[in-house]
Image (cartoon, grey):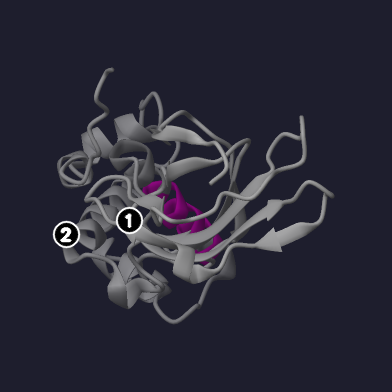
């Protein structure tokens, strides 16, 4: 078996969005009804709907910033420079591994057989762990990002799968933003979450970082 490091890769690495999820966490009609603006239900005002769409995205981003989790299921790609017996994926919750690829000694992209690794699930950050008898292939010397992992992470494909407490918190936040357009006096999206009352629901999902 070729040499590799015998510890999990827990350092910060690059993550790229491959396929963004364009679905909103709540519907525009739900938002307008909760904001007591029923006259905007049904797409009667495209300018107002565009504003509300952005408000929902802002609230979703606030949830993700506070919780360190991904709300809407998203396809990601991450990179590693060398083999480890496992890789920590710092997007949560992990849904699936789409592929693990690498560039061999001849700079040819290869795909690791799905039978050679498995997911070790964790409530925070899950691991891609290789089987004990996996023969770690030789990589191209001095090439960064030689290993590429494609995966999907997030709670919901669409609004029907968003946890109810998070939906309610997002509704609280967007209605607060709507009621205070232009004069919120907030210092950022996290402050808006606090003032709107959404923060408590968001922080209940927070992944606590452990100082090493």
Q: How far apart are marks 1 and 2 (CA)?
A: 17 Å
- Mark nearest the camera among 1 and 2 is 1
Mark found first going from the N terminus, 1 or 2: 1
Residue 129 in the image: x percent, y percent? 39, 52
- Residue at the extreme top: 212
| 57 in magenta | yes
Relative to residue 154, is residue 211 depicted above or below? above
Relative to residue 82, is residue 176 depicted above or below? below
Q: Decide if residue 8 is on the left or right side of residue 197.
A: right
At 57% from the left edge and 42% from the top edge, which residue is drawn?
2
User: Based on the displayed image, in which of its 4 quarters is residue 27 positioned?
Assistant: bottom left
- Residue at the extreme front: 1
Q: Decide if residue 15 is on the left or right side of residue 198.
A: right
Q: What stretch is highlighted in magenta?
A: 49-60
Judge whether residue 23 can be spotted in this image. no
Label 2, secondary structure: give it: helix
Label 1, secondary structure: give it: loop
Of 197 and 212, which appears nearest the observer? 212
Of 28 and 139, which appears nearest the observer? 139
Task: Say few, some or many: other residues with alpha carbon within 10 Å of mark 2 (under 14 / 14 to 19 / 20 or more).
Answer: few
Mark seen at residue 93? 1
Of 204 and 212, which appears nearest the observer? 212
Judge whether residue 85 can be spotted in this image. yes
At 50% from the left edge and 60% from the top edge, which residue is drawn?
151
Identify the residue under disc 2.
165
Residue 155 in the image: x percent, y percent? 32, 63
| 110 in magenta | no
Query: Is the residue under label 2 in contact with that under label 1 (CB below 8 Å)?
Result: no
- Residue at the extreme right: 106
Q: Decide if residue 107 is on the left or right side of residue 87.
A: right
Task: Say few, some or many: other residues with alpha carbon within 10 Å of mark 1 (under 14 / 14 to 19 / 20 or more).
Answer: many
Tell me how many marks there are. Answer: 2
């Amino acid at each position: 078996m070729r040499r590799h490091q015998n510890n999990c890769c827990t350092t910060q690495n690059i993550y790229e969005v491959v396929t963004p999820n364009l679905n909103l966490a709540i519907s525009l009609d739900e938002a307008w009804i909760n904001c007591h603006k029923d006259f905007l239900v049904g797409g009667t005002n495209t300018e107002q709907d565009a504003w509300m769409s952005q408000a929902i995205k802002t609230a979703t981003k606030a949830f993700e910033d506070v919780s360190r989790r991904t709300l809407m299921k998203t396809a990601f790609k991450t990179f590693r420079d060398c083999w480890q017996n496992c890789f920590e994926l710092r997007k949560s919750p992990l849904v699936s591994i789409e592929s693990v690829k690498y560039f061999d000694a001849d700079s040819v992209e290869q795909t690791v057989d799905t039978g050679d690794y498995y997911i070790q699930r964790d409530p925070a950050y899950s691991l891609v762990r290789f089987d004990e008898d996996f023969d770690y292939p030789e990589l191209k010397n001095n090439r960064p990002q030689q290993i590429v992992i494609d995966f999907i992470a997030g709670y919901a494909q669409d609004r029907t799968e968003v946890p109810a407490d998070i939906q309610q918190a997002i509704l609280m936040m967007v209605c607060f933003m709507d009621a205070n357009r232009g004069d919120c006096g907030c210092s950022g999206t996290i402050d808006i979450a606090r003032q709107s009352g959404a923060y408590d629901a968001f922080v209940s999902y927070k992944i606590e970082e452990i100082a090493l």
